[in-house]
Amino acid sequence: MAIERTSHSPAQTMAIGQQLGAMLRTGDVLLLLGDLGAGKTHLVKGIAQGLGSVDLVTSPSFVLINEYVAGAAHANMRIYHVDLYRITDPAELTSIGLEEIWNDQGICVIEWAERAQHWLPEAHLVVQIRYVDEMTRALRFVPQGARYQHLMAEFKDAAGD
Ligand SMILES: Nc1ncnc2c1ncn2[C@@H]1O[C@H](COP(=O)(O)OP(=O)(O)OP(=O)(O)O)[C@@H](O)[C@H]1O
Ligand SMILES: [Mg+2]
């Protein structure tokens, strides 16, 4: 069951991320798809806030992976923020240790996940962000696997729709 949301501002995209972030658990993997400037990093800022993190969320384009710490209510778990924009060959993923990251006790949010092709866990939540106009973005959440179907049921209820 896919869920669609429309955002009318960067703040609203962050608020959507915050709502989702609060529901995430250890081991969750989120794949973010969308063009340059779609709003992926803004969504991650919200996700980190929703997990009670006070760390500064910035684009990991150069370092590929940023690590944040969630708040005490979320057992200070790690939030791995990955950006694969610069990956040209999925074989490079082994050298950056991506597999260790999603197997770790944390959550993993991956921008430009399409660069990894099939080198990603089968169970995951896809978030597609589409540019509609300057301030408007269409977000589509597509769950793969039972955990993410449950997550989307919870997410849908929280929105009251
Ligand atoms: N509704 C909206 N939601 C999110 N960002 C928006 C929205 N409206 C306008 N914007 C603008 O779009 C840009 C989104 O930037 P952001 O870095 O989040 O995108 P991104 O998808 O991570 O890009 P990149 O592929 O370069 O990493 C920002 O400049 C932001 O101000
Ligand atoms: Mg980004």
Image (cartoon, rainbow, N blue to C red):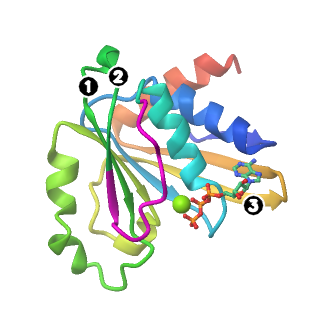
**Vertical side of 126 occupied by 8: above or below:** above
From the image, tell me which residue sits under label 2.
Answer: 71
Q: Earlier in the sequence, mark 1 or mark 3?
A: 1
**Would you call the spot at circle 3 few (<14 residues within 10 Å), some (14-19), or many (20 or more)?**
some
Estimate the spatial distance between the alpha carbons at disc 2 and disc 3, rounded to whole Å.
31 Å
Circles 2 and 3: CB atoms closer than 8 Å: no
Quarter of the image with the C terminus in it:
top right
Estimate the spatial distance between the alpha carbons at disc 2 and disc 1, rounded to whole Å.
5 Å
Estimate the spatial distance between the alpha carbons at disc 1 and disc 3, rounded to whole Å.
33 Å
Left or right: residue 147 versus residue 49 is left
Camera-side residue of 146 and 110: 110
Circle number at residue 76: 1
Please, what is the three-letter code of the amino acid marked with disc 3?
Answer: Tyr
Q: List x then y, in percent, for residue 118.
A: 31, 69
Circles 1 and 3: CB atoms closer than 8 Å: no
The rendered magenta stretch, by its main secondary structure, is classed as loop
Circle number at residue 131: 3
Q: List x then y, in percent, for residue 5.
A: 70, 39
Residue at the location (44% across, 28% down)?
Answer: 151
